[in-house]
Amino acid sequence: MLLFLLIVTAFAIAYTKDLFAVVMLAGIYGLLSASFFVALDAVDVAFTEAAVGAGISPLLMLATLGLTGRFQTQTKSRFYLLGFALVVLVGALLMIGTADMPAFGSVDAPAQQHVAPRYIEKSYEEIAIPNVVTSVLASYRGFDTLGEVAVIFTAGLGVLSLLSISRKEEEKEGGVASMYEHTILRIVSKILIPAMLIFALYVQFHGEYGPGGGFQAGVIFAAAIILYSILFGLDVAKRVVNESVLQILAALGLLLYGSVGVVTMLSGKNFLDYNALAEDPGTGQHIGIIVIELGVGITVAAVMILIFFAFSRRMDREGGA
Amino acid sequence: MIEQLLSHYNYWVVIILMMVGFYIVVAQGNLVKKVVGLNIFQTSVFIFYISVGKVEGGTAPILVEGVDVYSNPLPHVLILTAIVVGIATTALALALVIRIKEAYGSVEESELQIRDQQC
C-alpha cells in the first residue's frame, strides 16, 4: 500500500510543472519511503531518511528554487518520445530480470546466505553491542564508513567553494527573517528545538543499543539548527553556531575518525581494529565505536549546517539586490 | 502469474519508480527537476536494497533475547550511509545549478544549449 502511494507521488512529480509543488511532493515521497523502511525492519535507515528525505533535502531544493525561479518554462525536451521509449524498454527488460529473483522475504535467498548470518550470530560475541547495524557500520565495515564520511566532507567543501561569498559582501546583509512574525511558529519551535537537540544527542550515544548512531544524530542535529535559522534568521543562528567553528568541526570529525585508526595501528593491530584500544576486546570495541560515531556525527552535522548556510546566504544576497 | 506478482511486487514497484526518475532525468529540461528525478531514482535503489534484506517473520536487527529471526543488517548499513552521502551530493548538484543560473541566466536545458552555440 505504501509502495502504491510512492508510485502515485512519483508520477505526480513527473507531471507537475510548478516546481514548488514538486519539491513539496518530494518531501512527501521522502516521508513515505521512511515509513516503508520502518515496515521492512530497517529502523536505522528510516531515521535517516525521515530527517534527510523529508527535512533537509526539500529545504535545500526550496533555497535553490528561490534563486532559479519557480516554474518550468518548457515541459518537454526534443528527446521526449525517444526518452519515453527508452524508459519503457529498460523497464521491461528489468521486469523480465526480476523473474529470476527470489521471492520477497524468503529466508533462503542468496542475500541472506553469505556474511549476514555471521554478523547476526557472532557480532554480540565479537563486538558486544546489540545493534547489529551499528556494529557492522562502525566495526566490521569501519573502513568503508571512513570513506563515506570523507565523501560527505568533500561534497561540503565543494558546495562551500561553489557558493562562498567574500567577507566584505557578507557584512552588508541584515534584517529579520520574515518567519519571525508568525507567533505560533516561533513559540512552537522554541519548544521543539531543544527537544530535537536532546533527541539528537540521545540518538548519537544510544546507537549501540537502539536504532541510531552518528549519521542519524548528525542529520537530526542539523535539522534542528536549520529550523532555528529559518525561523529566527540567518544572523541570529550564526551568533549561536559560529561558521568558522563549524568549518573546523567538519574537518575535526573526520580527523577524529582517522586518528582512531592510526592509534590502533600504533598499538600494533590493523587500521581501525578497536580490540587494540583496551585489554578486553569488548571494551575496546565500545570505546572505538563511541569515538568514531562521535566523529561521524560531528562531521555530518557540521557539513549539513554549513551547506544550508551557504545556500541561504546566496538567497539573502539575491533578495537584497 | 498472480503468485509471481505478489512475491515480486516490491521489485516491480522499484522498477516503476526507477523508470519514473529516469524519465524525468532524460526527458525534462529543467535542471532542478532533473535533480528531483535523480533523487527518485536513488530512493528506488534504496527501497530495492531494503526489500532484499527483509526476511519473512524477521524483526529489526537489534539483538534481544527470545528472538531468532532478524532481517539482514548489511543492506541497512549500506543504505544508511548512502542516504547521507546522497544528500551531500544532491547539495553539490544544487550548488552547481545555482552557479549555472548565475552564469547563463536560465536552468532550462534548451536555453543553455542556445547560449552555448552563440559563444
Image (spheres, coloured by chain):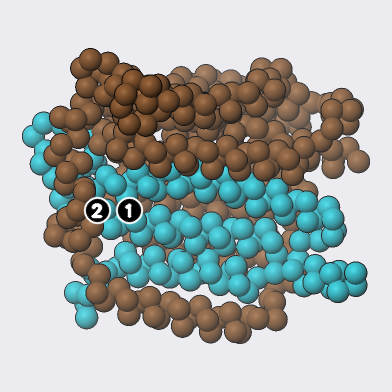
Chain colours: A brown, B cyan
Mark 2 belongs to which subunit?
B
**Residue A278, relative to residue A315: is it above or below?**
above
Q: Image point 70% across, 69% down: which residue? A: B29
Look at the image and tell me whether residue A189 can be seen.
Answer: no
Mark 1: which amino acid? Answer: Ile
Label 1 neighbour load within 10 Å: few <14, some 14-19, many 20+: many
| Residue B108 in picture, x, y percent from top left | 76, 66
Q: Position of residue A277 (x, y in %)?
A: 31, 18
Left or right: B50 as drawn, with respect to B95: left
In this picture, residue A58 sits left or right of residue A213? right
Cα distance in 3D space between marks 2 and 1: 6 Å
Picture quarter with the N terminus of chain B: bottom left
Is residue B91 visible in the rendered image? The answer is yes
Amino acid type, residue under disc 2 in the picture: Lys
Query: Element at badge 2?
Result: loop
Instruction: Please report the residue visible at 32 percent of the width from the left and 50 percent of the height from the top.
Output: B75
Which residue is located at x 20 percent, y 17 percent? A280
State left or right for residue B44 relative to residue B59: right
What residue would you read off at disc 2?
A: B54
- Give A146 or B52, whichever is nearer the viewer: A146
Image quarter in which the C terminus of chain B is found: bottom right
User: Horizontally, is A179 left or right of A155 in the view?
Assistant: right
Percent position of residue B88, x then y: 57, 44
Determine the image quadrant of residue A42. Answer: top left
Name the residue furthest top: A279
Asked if the residue at tag 1 contacts the one at tag 2, i.e. Cβ–Cβ closer than 8 Å, the answer is: yes
Instruction: Give me the residue at 47% from left, 41% from top.
Output: A147
Circle count: 2
Q: Residues within 10 Å of mark 2 (few under 14, many from 20)?
A: many
Q: Label 1 is found on which chain of the structure?
A: B
Is residue A266 or residue A93 the one in the foreground?
A266
Q: Which residue is mark 1?
A: B50
